[in-house]
Image (tube, grey):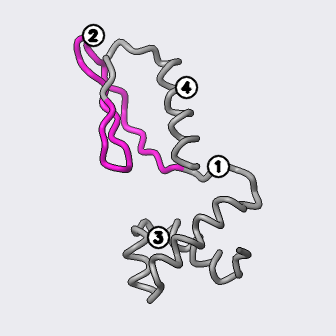
Amino acid sequence: MTLQKHHIRHIKNWQASGLTQAAYCQKHSLQPKSFSRWFRTYQTNDPSGQPALIPVTIKPAVALLPAEALRLHLANGQTLELPGTVSPTWLAELLQCLACVMVK
């Protein structure tokens, strides 16, 4: 399937909107199933070849006590809990891997 310019424009506008796909489709009188198909095609044929950007909120560092846990709240509502003693290098690699998986 080849995407038309207005499909790509809607996808980019949706990504910048902060809305869910369903809310964006309702607001713009689009069929959610069609929009999802456009987006899957767009992801597969992304001309830039670059992974999509994932929004990140950076908060001031808080000193963790060794017994405290580190909780990552994922966009899908799940929580990943790790020991507070986890290596920062390992954590950075994990986040990079998660970003790659979420993009696909």
| In contact (CB < 8 Å): disc 3 and disc 4 | no
Percent position (x, y) of residue 55?
48, 50
Q: Residue furthest left?
A: 67
Callout 1 amino acid? Pro
Q: Could you give the CA–CA distance between mark 3 and mark 1, rounded to whole angstroms?
A: 19 Å
Q: Could you give the CA–CA distance between mark 4 and mark 1, rounded to whole angstroms?
A: 16 Å
Q: Is residue 96 left or right of residue 31?
A: right
**Residue 37, relative to residue 62: is it above or below?**
below
Say which label, 4 or 1, has the lower sequence index: 1
User: According to the image, label 3 marks what residue?
Assistant: 17
Label 2, secondary structure: give it. loop
Residue 85: quadrant of the picture? top left
User: According to the image, label 4 marks what residue?
Assistant: 93
Residue 51's tag is: 1
Percent position (x, y) of residue 82?
33, 22
Q: In this view, does 83 lie to the left or right of 51?
A: left
Residue 66's tag is: 2
Percent position (x, y) of residue 14?
51, 71
Of residues 31 and 57, the one nearer the viewer is 31
Callout 3 amino acid? Ser
| In contact (CB < 8 Å): disc 2 and disc 3 | no
**Residue 17, relative to residue 104: is it above or below?**
below
**Residue 40, relative to residue 80: is it above or below?**
below
Of residues 80 and 64, the one nearer the viewer is 80
| In contact (CB < 8 Å): disc 4 and disc 2 | no
